[in-house]
Image: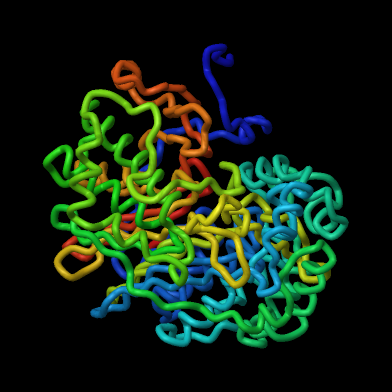
Amino acid sequence: MSDPDLVLEWPWLDRVPGSTVSHLGGRAVVGGRGMVVAPQPLASEAGVAVLRAGGNAVDAAVAASAVLMVTAPMQCGPGGDAIWLVRPAGGPAFAVNGTGRSGRRLETERARAAAARDGDRGAWTITVPGAVASWVAVLERFGTMPLDSLLAPAIEAAEDGFFVSRYLHAALTAAEPVLRRSPPASEWFLSAGVPAVHARLRQPALARCLRLLAASNGEALYRGEIAAAVASSIAGAGGFVDEEDLADHATQWDEPLAVTVGDLELLQAPPNSQGIVLLEALRLSSEVLGKPFPDLRRVGDFHVLIESLRASLADRDAVVGDPEHSRLFETLLDDAYLSSRAASIDPDRARRCWPAGIGEAAASAATRDGDTANLVTVDENGTAVSLTQSLYYDFGSGIPVADWGFVLHNRGACFSFAPDPVNAIGPRRRPLHTLMPGMAVAGGRPRYVFGCMGGHGQAQTQAQLLARLAAGDDAQEVVAAPRFFVDPEASEPVLYLERRIPGAVQQALAGREHPVRVLGDWEEIMGHAQLIEIQPSGAFVGGGDPRTDGHVAAW
């Protein structure tokens, strides 16, 4: 029987009977030679098969990433972006920026007119897709196996098909209006209607694409037959990226941002990733509470973490964009700035509106809709990877690349049209990216490898994971625990809580003037998290998210 008082703000999973999770969060999986956690079982198993065959965590990540492009096509594909954290055994970590730039011929006023006409799925939102190029770049530096062998499981899944889960069926049902906009996408996914639960889904056009990517070592997407098709699709829809933009794309290698919280060194990718939000928020909460991590069993700590995240998200919208155009974001981790910002957090009362502490927040063109896939891998030699890839919205722009089985992302919807913002739309720019793979190092070795989907909620989910890990919960308990989400784009502040959060906590937060709204038990907006904790004993302990088809594969 339904609860008449239950508010479901994101009910799309409930549109299909039986699609929501009703069980407990499961138990952690433990391994010792390698582990892959992904939001879909075939991806995790493909990755661990690579480890068993002698590959390393980077090889496993590429194999799992490619399978996700087949089995989670609403979240990722060859037409999307990726950001990595890679920490090779015994060496420093690297942030790998697999995001693309806007077209060099982009005209702001034309883009503004297109946004007004076409919304945030129009071709004006398409930037160069960088995920495939990032595979090649990371394999060249750290891989041990060739791309063609790593793509074989994905090609098989696309060609022979795989069985549709309840989650994927619900996702395709929700995305049907977008897919119906174009004959190719309708043919690929809806030729006989939305595939039924446990029906076999084949994607021969995508298999053909993956074969050519394997044969060309990814080159065909940037200089070749697929590149020509991509440019033609974008031009036909009125976008700005052309073959020259594709050929000019290069994956960028960066030093991760790092802060120390307690005995952990927390790593995030630098802008244009939003990873700095997590680092700032945890430093703020630590400053206010006088301890490394909040204890989410204490309402006061719960409140301070929420306010710290709200403050950090406001700062993000003022200072995070393409770092080639502004380095203002570096201020957010300055000790003096953090002390000043922390002093503005009231430990007993929620602030109605959080302005940016530096600069001026500028809203992007996008809404809170979005879709992303993260995966994490470790191997017995100590290499660790967190890889997050995305089309942004479910099926991105919805604009298909005819004959090749994939759609193009709409990450450019994250640009801002406000006057002179850091994240301003313009030619040859990378937009603010919500992708933020995470890692924590202790004693010179990876301790936690994590990430999630969730758009604006990614930093919020990761902060909650780390707080619960600090309290001693294991990986699966942490991933399955109930979560909160605050929407930084809402006209009125709202704190969304999963119903499993104790009623006394809900009431106490409302008493601190948080505008509480209770959702269901397992909510999509709370993100899909993946987590591996590496114990001092050498054990790998993995947690997969029951909010999706999360799966831990261990060796």
Q: Is residue 204 visible?
A: no
In-image side of 8 versus 293 (left or right): right
The residue lying furthest to the left in this view is 290
What number of labels is visible?
A: 0
Please state the horizontal and vertical placement of residue 535, each as a whole percent of the image: 21, 59
Q: Is residue 341 left or right of residue 150?
A: left
Q: How is the image coloured?
A: rainbow
> Where's residue 369, x and y in %?
60, 43
**Most extreme residue toward the front, as rendered?**
419
> In the picture provided, is 313 more to the left or to the right than 197?
left
Look at the image and tell me in which quarter the N terminus lies.
Answer: top right
Quadrant containing the C terminus in the rendered view: bottom left
Residue 84 at least partly seen? yes
Q: Nearer the viewer, residue 178 or 12?
A: 178
What residue do we see at 64% from left, 66% from top?
127
**From the viewer's perspective, is residue 4 above or below residue 34?**
above
Q: Residue at x 77, y 49 (%)?
A: 118
Counting from the top left corner in percent of width and height, residue 505 is at 30, 21
Q: Is residue 33 above or below residue 482?
A: below
Q: Of 359 and 248, which appears nearest the observer?
A: 359
> At x 21% / y 36%, what residue is drawn?
295
Can you give x and y, in whole percent of width and height, for residue 79 in the image?
A: 66, 67
